[in-house]
Image: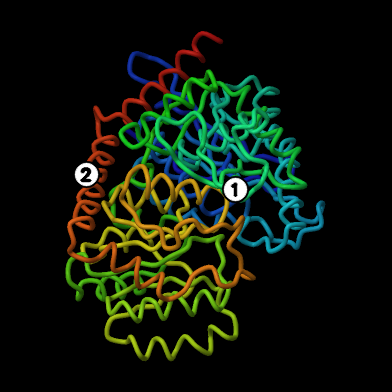
Amino acid sequence: MHFYHGIVSIIGENNCSPMTEQFDVMKLGGGQQKPHFVLVPLFAQGHMIPMVDLACLLASRGALVTVVTTPVNSTRFKALIDRANAGGLLILLAELRFPCAEVGLPEGCENIDQVSTREEAIKFFLALSMMAGPLVACLRQQWPKPTCLVSDSCNPWTSDVARELGLLRFIFHGPSCFFLLCSRNVYEYASSGDVPGDMFHPFFIPGLPQKIEVVRAQALRFFDYPGREKLQEQVTEAEATADGLIINTFRELEAPFLDLYQKSLGKTIWPIGPVSLANKEAEYTVLRGDKTTANETERISSWLDAKDTASVIYVSFGTIATNSPSHIFEIGTGLEASNRPFVWVIKQRDMSQEVEKWLPELEERTRSRGLILKGWAPQVVILSHPSVGAFLTHCGWNSTLEAVSLGIPMITWPHLADQFLNENLVVKVLRTGVALKPQMKTLFVTRESEGLIAREDVERAIEAVMDGGEEAQARRQRAKQLAIEAKKAMEPGGSSYESLTLMIQHVVDATVTHV
C-alpha cells in the first residue's frame, strides 16, 4: 500500500495549495470512503501535543488527517509528522499565516507560551478568530474534501467554519472530564446558593458521587475571568452545538464523571486516551512537543541508567506555569534536603538573574545526585525510565495523564486553570498523589507569587511519596494498576480503542447519509 507523503502549504491568507495527488487508497474496507479529519488545535504546547497525538491515532486507523498550523508552530512538530508519514501514515499540515500585525502582536508571536501579558492574551485569541476566513478558503480547495472538523474547545470560531462548509464538528477537550464536570457544576449551581459567592470560602462541589471540597477560585471554567466573558459564552455555545465530544482520557480512569458529563450535555462523548500512548516508538516519544538533540537525550538517559529503580524525583511545571525566584529557591533547597536523586527542568522564562547566580551553587552541592535541565526536556522519555519514582508536577492534564499511563506517583503543585481540579482528582479520587501544599488558596501561581510553599513542604511531600511505608506502597500500587488499565484501554479491544472506532464509524456513516 502506498501513501502520499507531503505538506499542504498555505503561504498567503487566502491562498492554498490544493492536494492534486489521486488517492487510490482513499477507500476503507467494503468500498466506504475514508474520512478526512481536519484538526484545529489551540496554539499552545499543552494543546498541540495531544492534538498531534490524535492525528497519529486517526491516521493509524486509515483516515486522512490535516492538521492546521502556522509557520512558528509547524517548526515544533513537523519532525514528528514527517516521522509518522515515513512510517506509512497520512498526515498533512495546512500552514496558515497567523495575523500578528493585525491585532498588534509582535511578528512571530504565534503560541500562547510567547504571550507575556493579559492584554497580549486577549489579542492572541482575537488573532485566532481571524483565521476563520483563510481556513474556509483553504479547506474549499482540499481534495479529498474534508468530512469532519475536530476543534480544540478554546477555538469556538471554528463552528462558523464547519457550518459554512457543511462539515461534522467535534470538540476536542484537552483537560480531564473531572475538570469539565466540576467546573460546569460549579457554574450551574452558582445561582442556587449551593456555591458561595466568596471566591475562597470552601464548599463541596455539587452533583458529584463523592465529596470534593474546593474553593470557587480553583473551580472556574477556562475563561471565567474578567474580560473573558464573551469568549466563555462562545466556548459554551460551540460545545452545545457540536456533533460530539472527544476527550483525552479513558473510561477506567473517569467512568462516573464521563457518564455524568455526557448526561449533563446530552452529547455523545468519545474518550480516546491516553493519546500519549499513541506511538511506542522511541524516536516518536523524543520528538513529541519540541526539539531535543539526540546527544542531550542520550545524556539524560545515561544519567538515569546509573540510578536505582524508582529512586529519582522528576520535577517539571510544563510550558506555561511560571515560578518566582523565591519559589525556585524553595524547590531547589527542598530537593537538596531530601537527599534523593532528582531531575529538575527549569524553563528559560524562569531563569532570572537571581536564579542564574544561585543555580550553579546548588548544582555543585548536588552534583552526585542532581540533574538540572534548562529549557525543554523529553518528558515521556524521562518519566518512562525505570529509575523515576515520583513526579513533582503542576498537574497539567498532559503531564498528569503521562504519569498515570506510566504508573508514576505524583507530588502536586497546581498553578492555574484546570490544574487545581486535576490535583483533586489525583490526590482525593485516584489517590495516586500527595499535595505539595494542601488547601493552598490562590487563583494563580505566577512569577510574582511569594510565600506559597517552603522547602519543608517539598521535603515532606517527597518523603511521603518515596518512603517505604504502607501508605506510600499502596499509593504506588494504585498508580501501577492505573498504568496497566491505561495501556489496555489503547490496545485493540480496549475501551479507548473501541471508542475511537465508534467515533470514526460515526463520521463515515454520517458522511454516507449526508451524501
Query: Taking the image as drawn, is residue 344 in sight?
Result: yes
Q: What mark, if any, has residue 405 been given in the picture?
A: none
> Which quadrant would residue 435 be assigned to in this image?
bottom left
Q: Where does the image place residue 53, in percent across and percent down from the top left?
A: 42, 44
> As drawn, is 181 to the left or to the right of 310?
right
> As drawn, is 157 to the left or to the right of 32?
right
Q: Where does the image place residue 307, in percent across and percent down from the top left?
A: 20, 74
> As drawn, is 496 to the left or to the right of 387?
right
**154 is higher (above) or lower (below) than 415:** above
Residue type for callout 2: Gln
| SS for dot 1 | loop
Estimate how packed mark 1 is, as few (under 14), some (14 to 19) or many (20 or more) residues with alpha carbons within 10 Å: few
Quadrant including the C terminus: top right
- Disc 1 target residue: 201
Q: Where does the image place residue 111, in percent across and percent down from the top left?
A: 62, 56
Between circles 1 and 2, the one closer to the viewer is 1
**452 is higher (above) or lower (below) than 273:** below
Residue occupying the point 57% across, 29% down: 149
Q: Nearer the viewer, residue 117 or 441?
A: 441
- Disc 2 target residue: 481
Estimate how packed mark 2 is, as few (under 14), some (14 to 19) or many (20 or more) residues with alpha carbons within 10 Å: some
Residue occupying the point 25% across, 65% down: 466
Residue type for callout 1: His
| SS for dot 2 | helix
> As drawn, is 280 to the left or to the right of 505?
left
Image label count: 2
Query: Taking the image as drawn, is residue 81 in sight?
Result: no
- Marks 1/2: CA–CA distance: 35 Å
Of callouts 1 and 2, the N-terminal one: 1
Q: Where does the image place residue 95, in percent across and percent down from the top left?
A: 61, 47
**177 is higher (above) or lower (below) than 287:** above
